[in-house]
């Protein structure tokens, strides 16, 4: 079964309040088996638009990624983040097909 991923691009207006969101989101992320692959950090915009913060979160399955987003626990965290940020979030299914050799 393919893994699921949140791909997040975010601009944060209040970094101190965002820390509260990070504490609150730990609860649903742990519950749904999330693992950070990218969490902020240095980046180069090579094409298209960008935002200040980039995050990639891996879940054991695509369904787990959706279930986390729709959970009551994440909705509580989201209520903290929404007023202090603007961004783009997608949930995408991982690829398990052939790779370049």
Image (cartoon, rainbow, N blue to C red):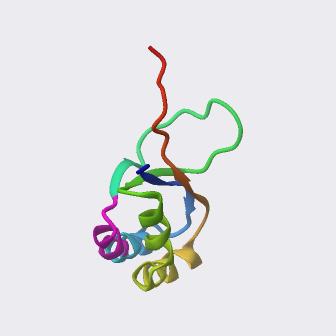
In this rendering, the answer to whether 27 lies above or below 62 is below
Q: Which residue lies furthest to the front in this view?
A: 1
Q: Which residue is drawn at 47% across and 53% down?
A: 5
In reply to whether residue 41 is colored magenta, the answer given is no
In reply to whether residue 28 is colored magenta, the answer given is yes
Left or right: 26 in relation to 68? left
Left or right: 23 in relation to 54? left
Q: In which quarter of the image is residue 30?
A: bottom left
Q: Residue 20's spot in the image, x, y percent?
A: 37, 76
In this rendering, the answer to whether 74 lies above or below 53 is below
Q: Which residue lies furthest to the right in this view?
A: 48
In this rendering, the answer to whether 80 lies above or below 97 is below
Left or right: 49 in relation to 8? right
Q: Residue at x 44, y 14 (%)?
A: 101
Q: Which residue is drawn at 43% across and 71% down?
A: 68
Q: Residue 23's spot in the image, x, y percent?
A: 32, 73
Q: Which residue lies furthest to the top in this view?
A: 101
Q: Residue 97's spot in the image, x, y percent?
A: 49, 33
Q: How many marks?
A: 0
| Magenta residue span | 25-34
Q: From the image, give the main secondary structure of the stretch colored magenta.
A: helix
Closer to us: 56 or 93: 93
Q: Residue 45's spot in the image, x, y percent?
A: 60, 34
């Amino acid at each position: 079964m393919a893994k699921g991923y949140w791909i997040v691009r975010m601009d944060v207006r209040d970094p101190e309040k965002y820390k509260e969101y990070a504490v609150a989101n730990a609860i649903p992320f742990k519950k749904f088996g999330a693992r950070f692959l990218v969490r902020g950090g240095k980046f180069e915009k090579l094409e298209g638009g960008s935002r200040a913060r980039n995050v990639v979160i891996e879940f054991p399955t695509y369904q787990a990624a959706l279930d986390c987003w729709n959970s009551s626990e994440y909705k509580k965290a989201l209520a903290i983040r929404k007023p202090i940020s603007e961004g783009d979030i997608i949930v995408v299914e991982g690829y398990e097909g052939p790779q370049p050799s």
